[in-house]
Image: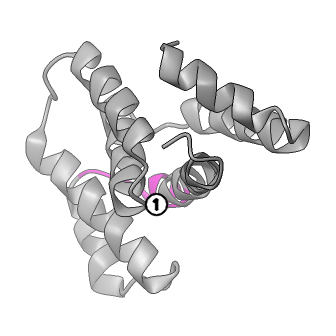
């Protein structure tokens, strides 16, 4: 973990429940059937939207460490779907869901995107509130 990440965690320790909740839900998100590149795309999409510069920096580095993405079009689809879920508060159109599935994702994956959005909304909002970001 980087010094900036350690500082952010230290700030979250003021609310052990928030820190513990984030760590638990993040572990669950990391265990989903979404592949690592797709998970990182969800995280980066939420972090960019919520302007959490700490998360963007950390997860850009994590994405780079994964190596080249196997399918850029597929990742573009998960990014678009994530943005549509956020914009519609989950009430995506049938067309949005169909486009996500056409890119090779499943309805299970769609729900996992929602989990990732929730996980990283907690993280990005907490980081911004504590001025870690």
Element carrying mark 1: helix
Highlighted range, magenta: 104-111
* CA neighbours of label 1 inside 10 A, class few (<14), some (14 to 19), many (20+): many
In the rendered image, the vertical position of residue 15 relative to residue 7, given as above or below: below
Give the side of residue 74 with respect to residue 98, left or right: left
Residue 81 rendering spot, x and y as whole percentages: 32, 66
Q: Residue at x 46, y 60 (%)?
A: 110
Is residue 33 located in the magenta-colored stretch of the structure?
no
In the rendered image, the vertical position of residue 57 relative to residue 61, given as above or below: below
Is residue 108 located in the magenta-colored stretch of the structure?
yes
Residue 59 rendering spot, x and y as whole percentages: 37, 31
Residue 74 rendering spot, x and y as whole percentages: 18, 48
Q: Nearer the viewer, residue 66 or 127?
A: 127
Give the side of residue 117 with respect to residue 119, left or right: left
Which residue is most to the front?
A: 131
Q: Residue at x 19, y 16 (%)?
A: 67
Q: Residue at x 81, y 44 (%)?
A: 18
Give the side of residue 128 with respect to residue 24, left or right: left
In the rendered image, the vertical position of residue 90 relative to residue 28, given as above or below: below
Q: Main secondary structure of the magenta part?
A: helix
Tag 1 residue: 110
Q: Nearer the viewer, residue 19 or 82?
A: 19
- The colour scheme of the drawn protein is one colour
In the rendered image, the vertical position of residue 36 relative to residue 33, given as above or below: above
Quadrant assignment, res 80: bottom left
Q: Residue at x 34, y 75 (%)?
A: 84
């Amino acid at each position: 973990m980087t010094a900036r990440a350690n500082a952010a965690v230290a700030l979250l320790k003021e609310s052990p429940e928030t820190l513990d909740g984030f760590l638990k839900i993040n572990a669950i998100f990391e265990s989903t059937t979404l592949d690592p590149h797709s998970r990182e795309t969800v995280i980066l999409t939420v972090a960019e939207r919520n302007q959490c510069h700490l998360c963007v920096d950390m997860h850009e580095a994590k994405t780079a460490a994964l190596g080249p993405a196997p399918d850029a079009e597929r990742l573009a689809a998960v990014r678009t779907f994530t943005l549509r879920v956020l914009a519609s508060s989950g009430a995506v159109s049938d067309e949005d869901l169909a486009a996500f599935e056409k890119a090779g994702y499943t309805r299970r994956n769609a729900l996992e995107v929602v989990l990732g959005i929730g996980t990283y909304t907690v993280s990005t909002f907490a980081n911004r509130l504590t001025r870690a970001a």
